Image: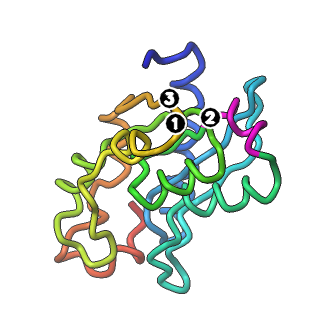
Amino acid sequence: MAARADDEMHLRRSFAVARAAAAKGNHPFGAILVGPDGTVLMEQENAYSPHQDMTGHAERVLMTRASMAYRPDFLADCTLYSSAEPCAMCAGAAYWAGVGRVVYGCSEEQLKAITGDHPENPTLDLPCRAVFAAGQRIVEVVGPLLAEEAVALHAGVWDRDGGHAGEKSG
């Protein structure tokens, strides 16, 4: 699918959310939900810390919040922007919430190459397109987009010799 005129601007906002998460010692992931009129409805930093919630991915938490605030028929016209490609769990959450469009920065494949076998991010190399393709409705996907900027968010974060990834400021 083709990128829209404002996709890069919104995606960069998700990068800013990811940087804010990293500045607080969290994993450098961020997501935003944008309404049909281009208004940012919600933002979400990664929620791994402080409780080491392995399911606290920014996209999953955002989709939980969105599904409680909006009906699927409204979310069908909304876009989820994410600093990294939604994993299988997050893609499932976006699908179940009813989001109609997803735009992401770095791919799961790129993220897996960055994180390796880090225990705090056992990345699944399963494209979100594959998850959505198994569904009963179409979810438009754009990405990877601005991948170099998205990958740069992870510089030094997942290094084994640098200690606990959640304690990095990325």
The tag earlier along the polypeptide, 3 or 2, is: 2
Badge 1 is on which residue? 102
Q: Could you say where residue 71 lies in the image, as x and y percent from the top left?
A: 80, 46
Badge 2 is on which residue? 79
Asked whether residue 75 is in view, the answer is: yes
- Alpha carbons under labels 1 and 2: distance apart: 5 Å
Query: 42 or 28: nearer the eye?
Result: 42
Q: Crowding at label 2, few (<14), some or many (≥20) Cα neighbours within 10 Å?
A: many
| Cβ atoms at labels 3 and 1 below 8 Å apart | yes
The tag earlier along the polypeptide, 1 or 2, is: 2
| Cβ atoms at labels 3 and 2 below 8 Å apart | no
Q: Crowding at label 1, few (<14), some or many (≥20) Cα neighbours within 10 Å?
A: many
- Alpha carbons under labels 3 and 1: distance apart: 6 Å
Badge 3 is on which residue? 140
Q: Amino acid at mark 2?
A: Thr
Residue drawn at 73 percent across, 25 percent down: 38
Q: The magenta stretch spans which residues?
A: 72-79
